[in-house]
Amino acid sequence: MKRHHLDFTEWEKKSLKNPKIKAEYDRLQPEFALIQAMIDARIHKRVTQEELAKKIGTKQSVISRLETGRGNPSVAFLKKFADALHTRLEIYFTAI
């Protein structure tokens, strides 16, 4: 049995041709962007999930849930997150 390897970029490009998948992907894009921004900020500051959790006053598991998309942080929590990393929280609305 021969297996075909499909990398993520190819899979994504192919999958997004399906209008239903594309609509759901677009609907979830802001959540994906927030998650990636949180991960990027933490990694850029070279802070572990555990270190960040201590700075915020929460548990490492909370940070993990947020970074895997299983959490729904409030704006107040995002402010604490930004403060703990010595960054500034900015939220934008862009015309479409």
Image (tube, helix red, strand yellow):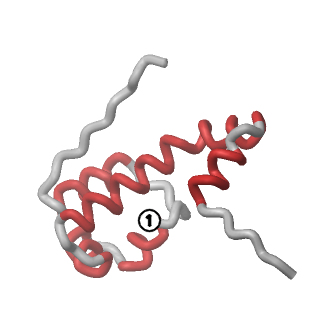
Q: Position of residue 73 (x, y in %)?
A: 43, 55
Quarter of the rendering containing residue 9:
bottom right
- The vertical placement of 38 against 5, above or below, is above
Picture residue at 41% right of the left edge, 49% below the top: 34
Picture residue at 63% right of the left edge, 50% below the top: 12
Q: Position of residue 33 (x, y in %)?
A: 43, 47
Work out whether residue 9 or residue 28 is closer to the camera in this orientation and state it: 9
Q: Which residue is mark 1?
A: 67
- The vertical placement of 40 against 89, above or below, is below
Picture residue at 51% right of the left edge, 61% below the top: 71
Quadrant where the image shows the N terminus: bottom right
Q: Position of residue 95 (x, y in %)?
A: 43, 17
User: 47 left or right of 3?
Assistant: left
Work out whether residue 22 or residue 94 is closer to the camera in this orientation and state it: 22
Work out whether residue 33 or residue 52 is closer to the camera in this orientation and state it: 33
Picture residue at 27% right of the left edge, 77% below the top: 48
Q: Position of residue 65 (x, y in %)?
A: 48, 69
Q: Secondary structure at mark 1?
A: helix
View extreme (right): residue: 1
User: 12 left or right of 48?
Assistant: right
View extreme (top): residue: 95
Name the kind of residue labelled 1 in the image: Glu
